[in-house]
C-alpha cells in the first residue's frame, strides 16, 4: 500500500526550483498573529542502503516536514522492503506524527517489521523502533528504543539481545557486524532531534545477500521539534538545475535548504565547477544560508553565486541571486529578492541584460533567456536569476536559485 498522508503538507521548500516556476505554492500561510509556533519534523523508513554500488533510497517512507501543524501525521505500510533483490524486511509499517498534549509538544516516529532476515545469517522477528523529541516546560528531551521478539545469529537464538542496550555491536559471521538499538540525539539552541534505528547492517564480508562495503539501516526513525518561535523559517538555494520536460538531467548543485534556520550562522556550500553533459559548463559557484527563529523574530536569507555559464557559443557572466523573509512578534513581516547578471555574449556580439521581473531575451537559434523569474506569496518568495531554454536540446537550465519564507 502506498503512503497515506493525513495532513495538509507544507510547502515544499524550493517550489520555484521547478523550471518555469510554479504559479502556486502549497504553503500554509497561517495568520499574522504573535502567538509562538512550534516546528515539527520527522520520518520513519523501513530500509535504506548506502555505499558500494547499492543505494536503495528510503523505502516505505512516512514523513512530516517543515510544518507548524501539531496534528500532522503520515503512515505507510508495505509487504516487503528489499535490498539487492533480497527481501530484508517483511510486513513493514512506519508512522510519524506530531503532538501537543500533556506530554508536551513533539514528534514521534515509529517503524515496525514482523520479520527482518538476511538469508541464514541474521533473523530478527517482531521488531519495533521508536524515537520521540519533546519540548515541555521549557526543556528539550528525547527518547529512543528498539525491542525484538526474537534474535537469531546464524542458527543460534540469542535471548539476551531481545532488549539490548543502546548501540549494541554484534558480530555476524559471514556478513560483518550489526548495531542493534542504535539511538542518539542532538540538542541545539533552536531545538532537538533524535534518531533510532532497529538494526544497522555493515556488510564487510563477501556474501550473496548484501554487497561487501554496503551499509543497510533497517527501521530508521527520526523526530525533531523546534523551540517555540514567532515563525518557522524555510527556504533553499542552488546554483544550477537542468530539465528536459519533466525529466531532471542535472539535479540542484551546491544545494542548501533549511527548516528552522542556522542559529544565525552563515553556512556556505561551494563547488569548483559544474558540467551538465552536452548542455552547459558552469564556473566556480557557491550558495549561502543564514536564518534564525525565536519568540521575538524569525528571519532567513539565502543566496546563490555563479562565476559564469557557457552553453555552446552562449557565454554568460557572473550570476547572483538572493531571497529574504522575516517576521516579528508584533505581526509584521516582509519578503524580498534580488538577482543580477553581469553580461551576455554570443561570440563577439554583446546582448543587453534586461531588468524587471520575468523579462525575456530571444537569441534566435540558440536560446531564450528569462531574467529574474519570481514567485511571491505573503510570506514566501523564490527567485531564479536566469532560466535558459536551449532550443537545440529542448532543455531548460535554471541558474542562481534562492528562496526564503516564514511559516506560522
Image (tube, helix red, strand yellow):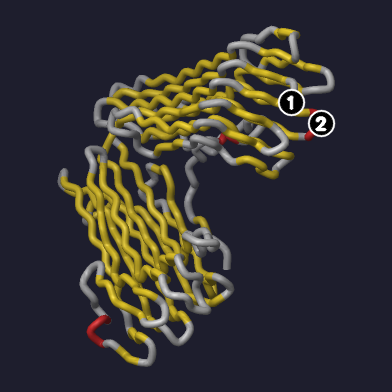
Residue 48 vertical placement versus 187 (above, below): below
Q: Position of residue 156 (x, y in %)?
A: 33, 91
Say whether disc 2 or disc 1 marks the residue closer to the N-terminus.
1
Name the image quarter holding the N terminus.
Answer: bottom right
Of residues 362 and 68, which is closer to you in this image? 362
Residue 295 vertical placement versus 222 (above, below): above
Label 1 belongs to which residue? Answer: 312
Crowding around mark 1 (Cα neighbors within 10 Å: few <14, some 14 to 19, many 20+) is some
Q: Residue at x 56, y 14 (%)?
A: 340
Q: Position of residue 46 (x, y in %)?
A: 46, 67
Secondary structure of the residue carrying tag 1 is loop
Residue 89 vertical placement versus 7 (above, below): below
Q: Position of residue 408 (x, y in %)?
A: 38, 34
Task: Please tell me whether mark 2 or mark 1 is closer to you in this view.
Answer: 1
Q: CA distance from mark 2 to mark 1?
A: 10 Å
Label 2 belongs to which residue? Answer: 392
Of residues 395 and 306, which is closer to you in this image? 306
Q: Are marks 2 and 1 in contact (CB under 8 Å)?
A: yes
Q: How many marks?
A: 2
Q: Residue at x 49, y 38 (%)?
A: 13
In the visual, does 307 lie left or right of 110?
right
In the visual, does 10 lie left or right of 308?
left
Crowding around mark 2 (Cα neighbors within 10 Å: few <14, some 14 to 19, many 20+) is few
Of residues 402 and 7, which is closer to you in this image? 402
Secondary structure of the residue carrying tag 2 is helix
Q: Taking the image as drawn, is residue 65 in sight?
A: yes
Amino acid at each position: 500500500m502506498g503512503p497515506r498522508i493525513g495532513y495538509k503538507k507544507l510547502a515544499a521548500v524550493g517550489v520555484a526550483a521547478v523550471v518555469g516556476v510554479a504559479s502556486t505554492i502549497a504553503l500554509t500561510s497561517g495568520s499574522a498573529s504573535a502567538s509562538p509556533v512550534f516546528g515539527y519534523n520527522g520520518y520513519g523508513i523501513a530500509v535504506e542502503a548506502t555505499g558500494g554500488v547499492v543505494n536503495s533510497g528510503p523505502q516505505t517512507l512516512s514523513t512530516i516536514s517543515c510544518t507548524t501543524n501539531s496534528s500532522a501525521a503520515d503512515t505507510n505500510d508495505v509487504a516487503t522492503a528489499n535490498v539487492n533483490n533480497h527481501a530484508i524486511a517483511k510486513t513493514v509499517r512506519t508512522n510519524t506524527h506530531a503532538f501537543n498534549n500533556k506530554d508536551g509538544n513533539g514528534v514521534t516516529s515509529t517503524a515496525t517489521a514482523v520479520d527482518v532476515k538476511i538469508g541464514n545469517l541474521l533473523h530478527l522477528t517482531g521488531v519495533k523502533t521508536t524515537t520521540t523529541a519533546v519540548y515541555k516546560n521549557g526543556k528539550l528531551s528525547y527518547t529512543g528504543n528498539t525491542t525484538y521478539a526474537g534474535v537469531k545469529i546464524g542458527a543460534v537464538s540469542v535471548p539476551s539481545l531481545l532488549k539490548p542496550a543502546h548501540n549494541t555491536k554484534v558480530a555476524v559471521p559471514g556478513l560483518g557486524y550489526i548495531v542493534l538499538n542504535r539511538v542518539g540525539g542532538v540538542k541545539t539552541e533552536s531545538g532537538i532531534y533524535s534518531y533510532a534505528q532497529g538494526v544497522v547492517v555493515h556488510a564487510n564480508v563477501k556474501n550473496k545477500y548484501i554487497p561487501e562495503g554496503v551499509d543497510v539501516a533497517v527501521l530508521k526513525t527520526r523526530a525533531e521539534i523546534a523551540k517555540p518561535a514567532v515563525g518557522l523559517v524555510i527556504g533553499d538555494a542552488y546554483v544550477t538545475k537542468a530539465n528536459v520536460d519533466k525529466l531532471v538531467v542535472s539535479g540542484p548543485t551546491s544545494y542548501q535548504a533549511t527548516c528552522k534556520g542556522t542559529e544565525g550562522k552563515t553556512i556556505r556550500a561551494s563547488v569548483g565547477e559544474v558540467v551538465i553533459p552536452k548542455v552547459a559548463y558552469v564556473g566556480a559557484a557557491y550558495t549561502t544560508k543564514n536564518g534564525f527563529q525565536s519568540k521575538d523574530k524569525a528571519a532567513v536569507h539565502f543566496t546563490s553565486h555563479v562565476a559564469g555559464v557557457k552553453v555552446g557559443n552562449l557565454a554568460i557572466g557572473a550570476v547572483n541571486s538572493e531571497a529574504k523573509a522575516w517576521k516579528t512578534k508584533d505581526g509584521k513581516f516582509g519578503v524580498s529578492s534580488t538577482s543580477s547578471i553581469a553580461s551576455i555574449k554570443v561570440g563577439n556580439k554583446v546582448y543587453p541584460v534586461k531588468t524587471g521581473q520575468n523579462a525575456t531575451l530571444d537569441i534566435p537559434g540558440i536560446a531564450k533567456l528569462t531574467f529574474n523569474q519570481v514567485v511571491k506569496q505573503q510570506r514566501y518568495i523564490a527567485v531564479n536569476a536566469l532560466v535558459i531554454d536551449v532550443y537545440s536540446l529542448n532543455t531548460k537550465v535554471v541558474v542562481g536559485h534562492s528562496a526564503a519564507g516564514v511559516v506560522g
